[in-house]
């Protein structure tokens, strides 16, 4: 999915600013955890840039990613890093729900991607409620969800983190993959296999 990052950034900044104004305390920078799964000691690291509101990303996670996980991640062959891209406030909200309990991140992200066509529709209030439902299914409490979705400091830090990463790796569409620092666009599982096997053999 190709989006105008400048326009998207302006919209997200506006939404984040509204959250910050709702918080009377001065905004504090929050350390953002790098979300990863697999073998951190592997010679091959795949970093995915994706948005929870991107249909192509949902398709990747429901298909190619499942095969990569079974054959390369769970077997310890590679390390897989997931970095969120924010095109809209709904993607940011989804990220804040997924990060509410980072030990459950990939399970929650699976629910978010699997239900994308359902939860990402309706008014902002309806979408927020849909994300809360996903959080509850994943075992999050109402108190946890309230704290996570109203954390303006976390929202601002997440957006700043995304913006820095996207600029460093020259990200302009999703999903985009960095494999040992080299950029690739979305691809079939067979193409991943060819590239990963070549990298692992080096």
Image (cartoon, rainbow, N blue to C red):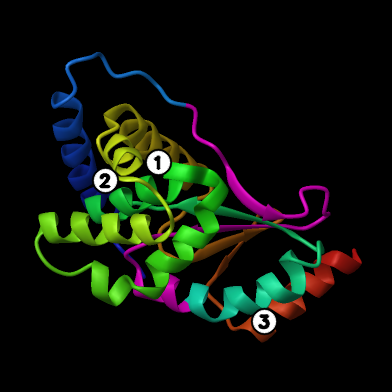
Q: Which of disc 1 and disc 2 is earlier in sequence?
A: 2
Vertical placement of residue 24 versus 89, above or below: above
Whether residue 34 is in magenta: the answer is yes
- Magenta segment boundaries in residue numbering: 31-59
Depth check, front residue: 200 or 15 = 15
Question: What residue is at 49 percent from the left and 27 percent from the top?
Answer: 31
Q: Quadrant of the N terminus?
A: bottom left
Q: Which residue is mark 3?
A: 191
Which secondary structure, mark 2? helix
Residue 47 image point, x, y percent: 61, 56
Distance, label 2 to label 1, CA atoms, is 8 Å
Residue 43 image point, x, y percent: 83, 54
Q: Which of disc 2 and disc 3 is earlier in sequence?
A: 2
Q: Quadrant of residue 3?
A: bottom left
Q: Which of disc 3 and disc 1 is earlier in sequence?
A: 1
Which secondary structure, mark 3? helix
Q: Quadrant of residue 73?
A: bottom right
Q: In this image, 161 relative to 27: left or right? A: right
Residue 129 image point, x, y percent: 20, 57
Residue 165 image point, x, y percent: 49, 42
Q: Which residue is mark 2?
A: 9
CB of mark 3 within 8 Å of CB of mark 2?
Answer: no
Q: Which residue is mark 1?
A: 163
Vertical placement of residue 73 versus 136, above or below: below
CB of mark 1 within 8 Å of CB of mark 3?
Answer: no
Vertical placement of residue 182 versus 68, above or below: above
Question: What residue is at 19 percent from the left and 23 percent from the top?
Answer: 23
Question: What residue is at 39 percent from the left and 60 percent from the top?
Answer: 51
């Amino acid at each position: 999915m190709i989006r105008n990052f400048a326009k998207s950034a302006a919209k997200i900044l506006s939404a984040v600013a509204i959250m910050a104004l709702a918080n009377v305390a001065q905004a504090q920078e929050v350390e953002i955890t790098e979300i990863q799964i697999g073998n951190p000691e592997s010679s091959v690291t795949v970093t995915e840039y994706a948005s929870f509101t991107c249909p192509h990303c949902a398709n990747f996670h429901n298909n190619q990613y499942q095969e990569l996980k079974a054959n390369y991640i769970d077997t310890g062959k590679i390390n897989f890093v997931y970095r969120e891209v924010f095109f809209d406030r709904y993607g940011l909200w989804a990220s804040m729900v997924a990060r509410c309990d980072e030990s459950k991140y990939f399970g929650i992200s699976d629910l978010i991607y699997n239900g994308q066509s359902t939860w990402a529709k309706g008014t902002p209030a309806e979408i927020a409620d849909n994300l809360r439902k996903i959080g509850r299914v994943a075992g999050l409490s109402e108190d946890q969800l309230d704290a996570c979705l109203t954390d303006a400091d976390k929202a601002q830090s997440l957006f700043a983190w995304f913006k820095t990463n996207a600029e460093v790796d020259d990200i302009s569409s999703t999903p985009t993959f960095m494999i040992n620092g080299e950029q690739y666009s979305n691809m079939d599982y067979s193409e991943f296999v060819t590239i990963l096997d070549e990298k692992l053999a080096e």
